[in-house]
Amino acid sequence: MKNYYKIILGIVGMFSLTSCLKDENILSPENTDKKNIVEFYNVTSPVSTGTDPYVMYVPMTLEVVPEAEFQIAVSYSGVEAGAPQDIEVKLEPAAEIVTTYNAKTGRNYNQIANSLFEVPSSVIIKKGEKRAFVTVKVKPTGMDQTKSNVIGLKISSASHGIVSGNFGAVIYSLPIKSLWQGTYTYTVTNDYGSIDANIGGSFTEEGVKLSTVGPNKLRVDYLWRTYSGYTEYQFDGSNSTITGITAFSGSARPTVIDKIVIVDPVNLIFEVHWTCLGRGIKERFVRTGD
């Protein structure tokens, strides 16, 4: 990420763009003075924001195959180096948390039918260990690829300890892999609208990742590869245009697409000009690898 320390000063002092990255499990405030916490563990980085009612992860992007699997984990946190005894952690599907998530965020995630996934009903965190891993099996060919498919899960009980208030229920997002997912040469230019000193006119960065986070929706970490947060690009079903851009840095930022220069699904190149926070931004992505 370009000029990190300079950027932080710009965020605080000039642009009101705030850090919202969340890389580690944090115990819920009501549980910080208690011991023996049982919770879901971050196997991958969350894609949700700090204000969302539940944490969301993308454990993997799916190919359209009969069956796929991924791992999740539960953990024990206490004063001991590991669990003081075997701890049985019971797991349950939790479609209701997806309903709550949608209502509070305005999103439209779809809890897939129980027949399309398998998750063990319980797992044991063994004495002396801090976490246990669980394999979840899913059936991508049975999913509606036009929907944002997820699995909501909760810890229904633990034989020892307190179930975390923040991480006792989570949502796993299961997007079908977009053809745009991969590694790119990224060029950003700010030469119209408000001029951002931290972007510095224009720069190019190699090895920038685009990751699938929804039906043909791709995310790049860091807004303009300069500020904390992310940008998401929504491609249409034919991969011939971009229908929307979401910018997030501390909060969602209004965006306007000014011009779509090129969307080439054969050579995997796209360029779009758009405005956010008054800054006119030209972005160009050229695919270089997986």
Image (cartoon, grey):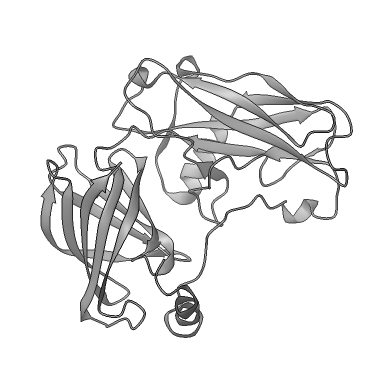
Tell me if 41 is positioned left or right of 235 in this view: right
Asked whether 13 or 251 is in front, the reply is: 13
Q: Residue 142's quadrant in the figure?
A: top left
Residue 202 at x, y percent in the picture: 24, 75
For the C terminus, give its image quadrant. Answer: top left
Figure disc tally: 0
Image quarter of the N terminus? bottom left
Compare residues 139 and 112 and report the one nearer the observer: 139
Q: What is the quadrant of residue 129 in the picture? A: top right
Q: Residue at x 14, y 48 (%)?
A: 241
Residue 264, above or below 8:
above
Residue 234 image point, x, y percent:
26, 48
Residue found 35% across the figure and 40% down from its top: 214
Q: Is residue 163 above or below residue 95?
A: below
Q: 62 or 94: which is nearer to us?
A: 62
Residue 223 picture location, percent across and down: 37, 64
> In the figure, 287 relative to 193: above or below?
above
Q: Is residue 249 left or right of residue 255?
A: right
Q: Which of the 4 image quadrants contains residue 83? A: top right
Residue at the image position 67 percent from the left and 47 percent from the top: 166
